[in-house]
Image (cartoon, rainbow, N blue to C red):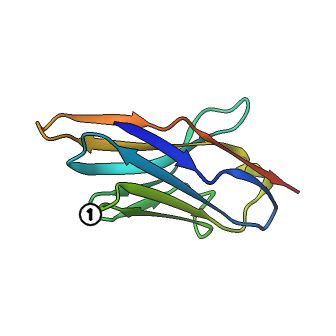
Amino acid sequence: VQLVESGGGKVQAGGSLRLSCAASGRIVSINDAGWYRQAPGKERELVARISSSGSTNYADSVKGRFTISGDNAENMVYLQMNSLKPEDTAVYYCYEVIRNEVGYVASYWGQGTQVTVSS
């Protein structure tokens, strides 16, 4: 299984970006998925997650500004980021908990995509 992220970049404060995470390989189902971020000198933190049932959770710092969604048919996970702030600057990583055809379940991570928000 491979996860490939896209959509990062540089934007001014108040702007928007949409991150995408494409999964490929031996995938029967995605049990859980989400986005983490890591800023320089800080620990990696959970930004948002979405379960297989569609329930979502967000970090307090992004509630009301970010929206996570998924497309199970296409094995895609998205993170719509609006009203971006300089403190959102970080490398964003997607993860997915995937079950393959023999029932094996494992977590997979993308390579990370840089988001830079200027003031």
Image quarter of the N terminus: top left
Instruction: Classify residue 16 by image quadrant.
Output: bottom right
Residue 29: horizontal and vertical position, in percent?
23, 50
Q: Residues within 10 Å of mark 1 (few under 14, many from 20)?
A: few
Tell me, yes or no, if residue 17 can be seen here: yes
Q: Is residue 55 above or below residue 86?
A: below
Q: Is residue 4 above or below residue 53?
A: above
Residue situated furthest left in the rendering: 102
For the residue pair 73 and 46, the one nearer the viewer reads as 73
Q: Is residue 119 above or below residue 65?
A: above
Image quarter of the C terminus: bottom right
Tell me, yes or no, if residue 46 can be seen here: no
Residue at 62% in and 54% down = 7
Q: How many marks?
A: 1
Residue 23: horizontal and vertical position, in percent?
38, 46
For the residue pair 55 and 94, the one nearer the viewer reads as 94
Residue at 48% in and 50% down = 21
For the residue pair 50 and 98, the one nearer the viewer reads as 98
Q: Secondary structure at mark 1?
A: loop
- Left or right of 46? Residue 91 is right
Residue at 52% in and 55% down = 20
- Left or right of 119? Residue 69 is left
Badge 1 amino acid: Ser
Q: Which residue is mark 1?
A: 53
- Left or right of 85? Residue 67 is left
For the residue pair 16 and 75, the one nearer the viewer reads as 75
- Left or right of 46? Residue 33 is left
Instruction: Classify residue 39 by image quadrant.
Output: top right
Residue situated furthest front in the rendering: 25
Residue situated furthest top in the rendering: 41
